[in-house]
Image (cartoon, rainbow, N blue to C red):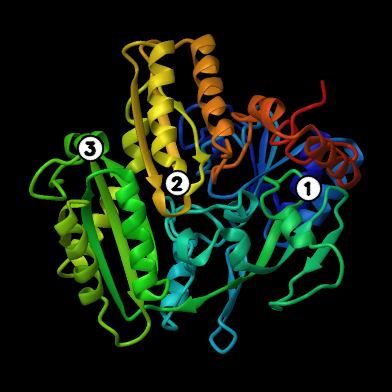
Amino acid sequence: MALLQDFAAIVGTEYALTGADTARWSKDWTGKYCAEPGVVLRPASTQEISQIMMLANAQHQSITPVSGHTGLVGGTYAPGGVMVSLDRMNTIHEVNVAARTATVDAGVILSSLHDAADNQNLIFPLTFGARGSAMIGGVMSTNAGGSNVLRYGNTRDLVLGLEAVLADGRIVNLMSALHKDNSGLNLRQLLIGSEGTLGIITKAVVKLAPKPRTYVTAMVAVQALPDALTLLNRLRDATGGAVEAFEYMPKHYIDMHLARVEGSRPPLSKSYDHNIMVEVATTTDADLTDIMLETMGTMMESGAILDAVIAKNEAERQTMWERREAAAEIAYARTPIIDTDVALPLDRLEEFLDRANANTAKLDPGCEPHYIAHLGDGNVHYSIYPTRDDAELRDRVVETIEDVVETLGGSFSAEHGVGLSKLSTMRRRKDPVALDMMRKIKGLLDPNSILNPGKMIPDQG
């Protein structure tokens, strides 16, 4: 009680929430990690977070940072603990048109940054389905990916500088807008993707890009996944690298979308096994439609492309995007589900799917695979609907999928982070020397292990 009063003195009594007032932070998006925190603190400044961390460190009190609470791996699970929400720190301080940067607080919602950039005829290119609630601090903490990684890169590639509060309350100022800075170790990149275990990110300088004048967006059915890779490479060559998104939606996903989304329509005239949403964009007056038509036409003649339709207007384009961005809601609408988020070399995707489907079916005859992919960057959201909700079966299925991923030179975590759900996988699959380095870095920056403890970095043993 005394500690709660001290925290409340820092943020204000009305911003130190307990009991029923914490309901908003008591359940993650998946519904898997549900627990009432002891208190949710809602500071309004970096200085208040610094005071919170000084007090917490002195008392060895664990702290769990939380942004939009849209994660999928239990990264903000804190039963009875102290959460620090960044939601009140939501100012867009500057959109610098000349430098094409924006300076933002960590609590800025992603779609708000999109709107601010759009007002200046610019874009912040990071985008995904939860953009209306995800916050900048969260996307940096997990190094979020999304649908435009192919052209613009992950979050790491879009952040020039940041500010963070360390476990002992010190504020590290890395708020540079420089594109080149070789003055020592890259601490900014160390904090990005650390899932709140090394510091609480409070502010950032992010890159903006010119807003495309025209988009050409299409749904394409291909004969097989290798044909999709051929289409991707040909379009990238023909457009000078202007492919923004290349998303894979197999037949079972299209069927589930039609069944679950009211008013949805089939993307093509017939049902096909392999469906791709592809988008190219240009900031010039060049018309990429002819390039798209010519490339697809050649592949249609060879039989590699079976069908295609190009969006005729913005409404049709948005319908194509909405079909893809409904993926998480569709996947989690059915339970039980065993979900993974893996990355593969682009030319091994078909082999991964074939082997993963076959191997999981041996473990659980009657199980149903469900997957979609950011095909352009090799990220597959691969899930299984098992025939029974069994913890032992779940572990065996996950290990079986991991085996295939490792054999093919992939990664067990592409863009969702590690959090709690992949801790055992980290212990099994991550290089032991790399794990040792992570533990030592954590120990140096957070010797009392109070920052989001038990997440991302598995204990030794």
Q: Is residue 290 visible?
A: yes
Residue at mark 3 to residue at mark 1: CA–CA distance: 42 Å
- Mark 3: which secondary structure? helix
Residue 102, position as x, y percentages in the image: 58, 75
Amino acid type at circle 2 is Asp
Residue 260, position as x, y percentages in the image: 21, 35
Disc nearer the start of the sequence (3/1): 1
Residue labelled with disc 1: 198
Residue labelled with disc 3: 251
Residue labelled with disc 2: 347
Which mark, by number, is residue 35? none
Q: For the residues carrying marks 2 and 1, which lies nearer the camera in this image?
A: 2
How packed mark 3 is, by other alpha carbons closer than 10 Å (few <14, some 14-19, many 20 or more), is: some
**The one of 336 and 312 positioned closer to us in this rendering:** 312
Residue at mark 2 to residue at mark 1: CA–CA distance: 35 Å
- Mark 2: which secondary structure? helix
